[in-house]
Structure formats: C-alpha cells, structure tokens
Image (cartoon, rainbow, N blue to C red):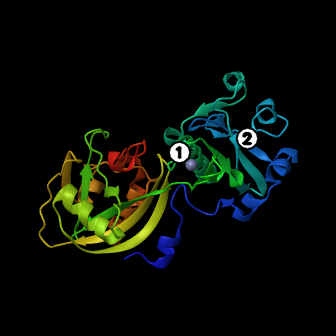
Amino acid sequence: MPSSSERSAANFLAGSYLDRRAELREDPYWLESARADAETLFLPAQGTALGVVGDPPTAAFIDHSHDLVRSSPDDSLVLLGWFRDRRCVLVQLDEHPMADRSRDDAFRFEELRPLAGTLGAEEAGLLAYARALAFWQRRHRHCGVCGSPTRPTRAGHVMTCRDPECAAEFFPRIDPAIIVLVSDGERALLGRQASWPEGRYSTIAGFVEPGESLEDAVAREVLEETGVRVVASDYHSSQPWPFPSSLMLGFMATAEPGAIARAGSELEDARWVTREDIASGDVVLPPPTSISHRLIANWFDAGSTVPLRTMRSRSWGATAPRGKAVSG
Ligand SMILES: [Zn+2]
C-alpha cells in the first residue's frame, strides 16, 4: 500500500492552487468589488471553451476595463476565488453580442481537455474548475421542480428558481466514479476501449450508482467489465475530472487468486499485464496527468527497482484517456 505521504501528493487538476473563500459568495457586494478592482483577473469562456493565449497556452486573463467585461451582464459572472492572491472571476460570453469579436482579439477559446497536459498545473486546475461550473450552469437553466427559468445566485455557485413560490436551489453537480488498479500481486488488471489509441490500456473505471458504497462500486465494476472478483480494496487518492463533472476516486484492489480476465460490454479487451509488458512498451499507458497512470505507477514501482517515471518516453501516448464510462 502507498504511504500517506505518497497519497497526499495532489493529482493533476487538484491541489491548493486556489483560495476559494466560499464565505464571500454570500457578500451582496462581491460583484461591485470585482468590477471595481483593477487587479481582478477575469477569465473569459464561451460555452465550455476557455480563453487562452500563446503557445504553449496560458490562461487569457482580461481586466475590468476590457469591453467584454464591462458589457457582460451580472448573471454571466462567477466568483472562482483568489488565484495567485488576486480575485478571479469567470466571464461567460455564450450569448454576448461581442463574443465573436474576441476571435480577432489577443486570445482564443479552446476546449480544456486537449490542452490540459500543456498548461501549467495551477492554471489547468483553475480552468478545470471554471469549466465544471460553466458546464453545470448551462445544464441547469430551468428548475427541475416547476420548470421555470433559474438564475445564478451566491456568486454563481447556486442556480435558483425564478418563481418565488418555488425558489428551489440547485447546487453544482459532481458525479463520483471509481477507478481501480486491481492486482494479483505480480500482475495488474487493465482494460481497453475500442476508441482508444492502439495499444492503450488503463485501469478499470465506472460511475458509482445510488445505494452503493465506493467499495461496492469497485467490486461491481471490476466484475462487470472483467469477470474478476475483488477480495479487498483500499482508497488511494482522487482527481477532479471535469469532462463533464466527474470526481475520480482511486483505489488499489486485490483480486481472488487465479482469476481469469474477460472483457465485458464496455471494453474491447481486458487482460492481466506484467511489469515486463509495461517496461517493454507492449502496453501503452494513459498519460502521466491521469490518476490511472498514477495508480499503475504506484503498483509498478512497488515491485520494480526502476521507477516507471524513468521510462517516460516510450510507455504512453500524448492524449488524455477517453474512458466512455467516465466521460461525456
Ligand atoms: Zn421552481
């Protein structure tokens, strides 16, 4: 099992890059303060695409004097928190009449997922958080109770029904998904989906269902997708995965001895993989920014004199994992 210090290292897209100061979402003057402060960092977004600049890209912050900020309606702004000691506000330009003009501007809008590995860790975390909130707001424009339109409240962190008789509140949605490295000691149980790059294998993952514990979900998903029974599982670490709204909960698990792997309906293949299969490049791993990679590395390093990270160049592809079970 990993030590507590190994587990406490933040996964990519997680960590203390942001001071959220959640209590200030209740401040009725947060918007005036943000708009008045020349130091405020405004992060433009169009849909779930976020403003970036340069190559390699960095977040395209604009300030309070920018036309797009000055002319944006209050409901399009979300208080993200304090980033590098400056207030940071998401500006959603979806229906902004000048949004098209920004394409001629100094920045461009790009989807985060292909960018994530090229952004610095702190900016990637901030943009992931912004993307999750933008996605959630766009899908909660109407009340699930009475069908009336909603409006953002509490600095954009709650969607509230506009009908005062109803006034139902909706909070950002997070979908828990387990992701698990199953081992029989010498081998790891990995699977691949048909849509993945050639040779790519990854850990088993799937959404937690209502009425399940995380441990129940680990055992069920592994059995459904590979036919292997898990006899024990332990929590490792977690990773926010805002594509669109998952929280990946990483586990290390032990399989019953001699279990044979077979692919279930969601996988093209499931197999037991040795450390030699990985070291030789026979199996292509997901990128190092993924929690799946970290779980595999954890298992690999426990039985190898050479750490997995020293084999970086040949063991994995460049793109993020595309688990259909945990993405949308
Ligand atoms: Zn309502």
Q: Which residue is at a point 31% across and 53% down the rendered structure image?
A: 202
The type of residue carrying mark 1 is Ala
The tag earlier along the polypeptide, 2 or 1, is 2
Asked whether residue 50 appears in the rendered view, the answer is yes
Q: Is mark 2 within 8 Å of ligand 1?
A: no
Where does the image place residue 250, in percent across and percent down from the top left? 40, 64
The type of residue carrying mark 2 is Phe
Asked whether residue 307 appears in the rendered view, the answer is no
Q: Which residue is at a point 77% across and 53% down the rendered structure image?
A: 87
Q: What mark, if any, has residue 61 been given in the picture?
A: 2
Quadrant showing the C terminus: top left
Vertical side of 211 occupied by 309: above or below = above
Q: Which residue is at a point 39% across and 57% down the rendered structure image?
A: 293
201 or 94, which is in the foreground? Answer: 94
* 2 vs 1, front mark: 2
- Count of marks placed on residues: 2
Q: What mark, if any, has residue 292 been given in the picture?
A: none
Callout 2 environment at 10 Å: few (<14), some (14 to 19), or many (20+)? some
Which residue position holds label 1?
116
Query: Marks 2 and 1, how far apart in space?
Result: 17 Å
Provide the secondary structure element on which disc 1 rests.
Answer: helix
Residue, far front: 165
Where does the image place residue 133, in percent across and percent down from the top left? 59, 48
Where does the image place residue 63, in percent across and percent down from the top left? 81, 40
Where does the image place residue 91, in percent across and percent down from the top left? 70, 40
Q: Quadrant of residue 199?
A: top left
Provide the secondary structure element on which disc 2 rests.
Answer: loop
Contact, mark 2 vs mark 1 (Cβ under 8 Å): no
24 or 239, which is in the foreground? Answer: 24
Callout 1 environment at 10 Å: few (<14), some (14 to 19), or many (20+)? many
Question: Is residue 142 toward the left or the right of residue 211 in the image?
Answer: right
